[in-house]
Amino acid sequence: MVLNSGTKDEKVLAAEIRYADREADLVLLRVKDAKELPVLRLGADDTLGELSEVIACGFPFGEALAIGKANYPAISINPGSVTALRKKDGQLHRIQLDVALNPGNSGGPVLDRTGKVVGVVVSGVKGSGVNFAIPVSHVSRFMDRVDMRFIPPTINAKNVRQPSDFEVQAMSILESEKSLNVELVLGSADEKQRRHNLVQKAGAHQTSVRAFPVIDGPTALRLSVSYGNDSVAGSADDRAFRVGDQELWLSEVGSIVTAKDQSVKLVSGKVIAGKVTGLDQVPINVGGKAYTFDLMAATRVLVKSPSRILAVPYAMVATRDGKEVGRLQGLLLNEDLVQKAYLCDLTEFEVRVGFGKFGKHGSLGYEDRESIVKGVKATKGLSMAPVDSSYSTVKYRLDKNAFSFRSGVGLFDSLEESFSPCTFEVLGDGKSLWKSKPIKQPQVTDACDLDVGGVEVLELRVNIPGNYGRARAIWVDPFVLKERE
């Protein structure tokens, strides 16, 4: 972003896209490392009428009017008036202006006589003097949200039974006298969700709760106990024991060696050496009857937990006066039980691309360039370019071992032209699981978060009819989640 363009006080500031609304045709930028920026106050468009005087600001023809190739242009101020108020479904949709505007003015503010914003330049009919602005009421609705930042707590086998600290930074984009409430929702919509109100403290909203649900009754475990050449298998309740001076639970354990060199291997793969105690009298249900076993006398114990919870969906929901104004959602993982596998690290098959080579690990494939979407490198991304009006595709074998698939999608940033709609699609065993919204240009993205439990073959497709060989479609760091082996 350029501030004070074309003056001696000119500054170039880094900015990132925070929100984009394709239907509203508006984008919100966050300026990095900048303070005390000048502000234009929002006005009202319900007082506008035909012939109302307005002023449009912007940069017609972009850098073409700059003095010198290395300079940015000075801003252009163009007076004019409202010539029509175009409505859609009874509501003001566009403000028609007779202001002299040209390509490059888009995104510039339209001010009333008091200097307040009443619209944003959006389009025009070339050579006609007829131009349009988005009404400020649309801008207000677009900005009536909360900018939220949240880093999920780390959950593992050691602390899964303890409360975790949740803290979210929530900032209103527009000033409001109404209080902001933030709620943490744990669990999916098809199960009993747990809701917790966050308390505002020290500039943040906070709470401390147990992230994973408490299982009613004892946790049932499957135990396979070896005594030399003999063995017994059955179910047992979860219980605490010790390895040296460290307390563990059976549900944290994959295997126990109680021979001379005693040790415990956790489900995370970590091995803890030390004397095992507290397992001398363990009730195990075998064939419907309970027997007591001395696991201290066993040579090896294998533990499996059918009731282990691998992940819990979460949502941070911000509301004001009962209206939702912000939401962040994702998946809390038990990191000792779950592993992330990026598709670029898996073996693909039946690859059909076209114009260039299939790109892996953030490479475009056909040349030594990195995949970049909305200014961010897709370091673990995949790139595809359809060869014809059909589609590009790539397949991966999941063998029913994964339970979740996630990916962002978009077009390579450096594309300088619009395309006919590009559609991304995910299929599981030949059945469509998800389709993206149509994407015609860079800076427009979509994302998917899918349940792929029971899927043998995962397939990714990209379709860009009529534009084969020119567009690079990027799967932004796609990965699956699966239980650790």
Image (spheres, grey):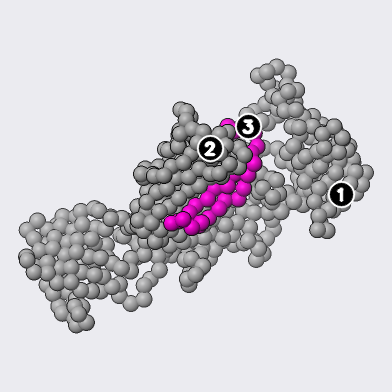
Could you tell me if the residues under marks 3 and 1 are in contact, i.e. CB atoms within 8 Å? no
The vertical placement of 307 against 166, above or below, is below
Q: Amino acid at mark 2?
A: Val
Closer mark to the observer between disc 3 and disc 1: 3
Q: Helix, strand or loop at disc 3?
A: loop
Q: Residue at x 80, y 46 (%)?
A: 118
Q: Which residue is mark 1?
A: 85
Q: Is residue 53 left or right of residue 472?
A: right
Whether residue 328 is visible? yes
Q: Amino acid at mark 3?
A: Glu
Closer to the camera in the image, 247 or 219: 219
Kindly state the secondary structure of the residue where label 2 is placed. Answer: loop
Mark 1 or 2, which is nearer the eye? 2
Q: Read off the magenta span.
A: 412-439
Q: Looking at this view, is 174 or 66 the one in front?
A: 66
Residue bearing mark 3: 416
Q: CA distance from mark 1 to mark 2?
A: 45 Å
N-terminal of the pair, mark 3 or mark 1, is 1
Tell whether 252 sits left or right of 391: left
Q: Main secondary structure of the magenta part?
A: loop
Identity of the amino acid at label 1? Leu
Q: Position of residue 474 (x, y in %)?
A: 51, 41
- Residue name at image x 83 percent, y 58 percent: 90
